[in-house]
Image (cartoon, rainbow, N blue to C red):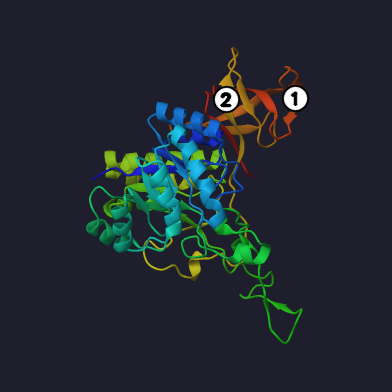
Amino acid sequence: MKKPELLIPAGSLDVLKTAVIYGADAVYIGGEAFGLRAKARNFSLEEMKEGIAFAHAHGVKVYVTANILAHNEDLEGVRAYFGELKEVEPDALIISDPGVFQIAKEVWPQVEIHISTQANNCNYGTYLFWHSLGAKRVVSARELSLEELKEIRRRIPEDMEIESFVHGAMCISYSGRCLLSNFMVGRDANQGACTHPCRWKYALMEEKRPGEYFPVFENERGTYIFNSKDLCMIEHIPDLVDAGIDSLKVEGRMKTALYVATVARTYRKAIDDWFADPDRYRERMEWYKEEIGKCTYREFTTGFFYGKPTAQTQIYDSNTYVKNYIYLGTVSGVDEKGRCLLEQKNKFCVGEKLEIMKPSGENVTAEVLGIYDELGSPMESAPHPQQKLVVELDSPAEIYDILRRKDE
């Protein structure tokens, strides 16, 4: 069986480097235009160039999203943008709009094109259509079961690839084509500006009783009727492989480096363990589940893979994330005294116990012995996000290690 690619999201250059170091085979990113995560930091062309060079030096591919549903006024800008991307040389473009696809083929005939899930790719006929136009890969609609994916695999050419989301947030809309955000606040999800109204709190109002609000579900706080649990397939790697999926995709270009590192490292270990020794994969299942639960999530579901979701895949009573660990920072260097250099993300104090998360899969408990600012002045705590710090720990840390603390 072919080992599937592990495809990890990155919303910034730092997170791209984290994804690469923590086990990605490929990373997908967005530029400053024409992608569906307008609120992510995204990449300038110079950052793309640096990120692609870093990834390629580690044997990792980079795909660039250009998956908006384009309007007339977008097309000339798309043409110019693809001309610029050609010089940066990503490994593939992710596209959903046929007009944008055509422009990419005209501007850059050699480019590998992957068809975004936004194109609603639900059947083998759609795959064959895109293959006939020169697409290398199609991202399956999230609404497909494993049985449907197996049939697609049987009916498409061997050299055509299937990419499927296996972890992350689920849209309530069909394959991400949602009008709620546009309708309610004028920000178009299909142009990259989604405000996620599916996560908001709703109540029911009867036509003849204006101003009287009733919960849709029997709960005095209202209900989150559109709020899906997050997808997680860490326990089902063998089934994903058996279905013939070529690329296992993680959602989350808005996520932190801690989230990306946690998910990438856990799926990397699970995939490698399954292919090296299926018994080892089964024996380590509790470790995978424990580790994947250390990043922020909304409870887990297997989505549509084993049939249509039921009421149990929704979260009706709150929009609260489960947050077991707090991201403190990523080690950017180590000084001559063995102290960590990092940009602080959340508050921590001298004397606290934290965890050093290593790309290898090891987690090391450490105590904070000292915190110093850039001038070398000692500090009792680090309360200011983005402050550059020197941190002394009682256990050694290395560049790209992540410091995190259990959220009590």
Which amino acid lies under the numbered mark 2 shown in the image of this protein?
Ser
**Label 1 environment density (alpha carbons within 10 Å; few <14, some 14–19, many ≥20):** some
Say what secondary structure mark 1 lies in.
strand
- Residue positioned 26% across, 61% down in the render: 151
The front one of 108 and 193 is 108
Find residue 395 and report its image quarter.
top right
- In the picture, measured across the screen, residue 319 lies left or right of residue 312, that is right
| Residue 211 image point, x, y percent | 77, 78
The front one of 284 and 258 is 258
Marks 1/2: CA–CA distance: 20 Å
Which amino acid lies under the numbered mark 1 shown in the image of this protein?
Met
335, above or below 174, in the image: above
- Residue positioned 41% across, 51% down in the render: 101
| Residue 157 image point, x, y percent | 23, 53
335, above or below 326, in the image: above
Res 332 label: 2
The front one of 217 and 80 is 80
Res 234 label: none
277, above or below 137, in the image: above
Q: Which residue is mark 1?
A: 379
Q: Is residue 192 visible?
A: yes
- Residue positioned 50% across, 28% down in the render: 50
| Residue 377 image point, x, y percent | 75, 18
In primary-sequence order, the first of circles 1 and 2 is 2
Q: Is residue 302 visible?
A: no
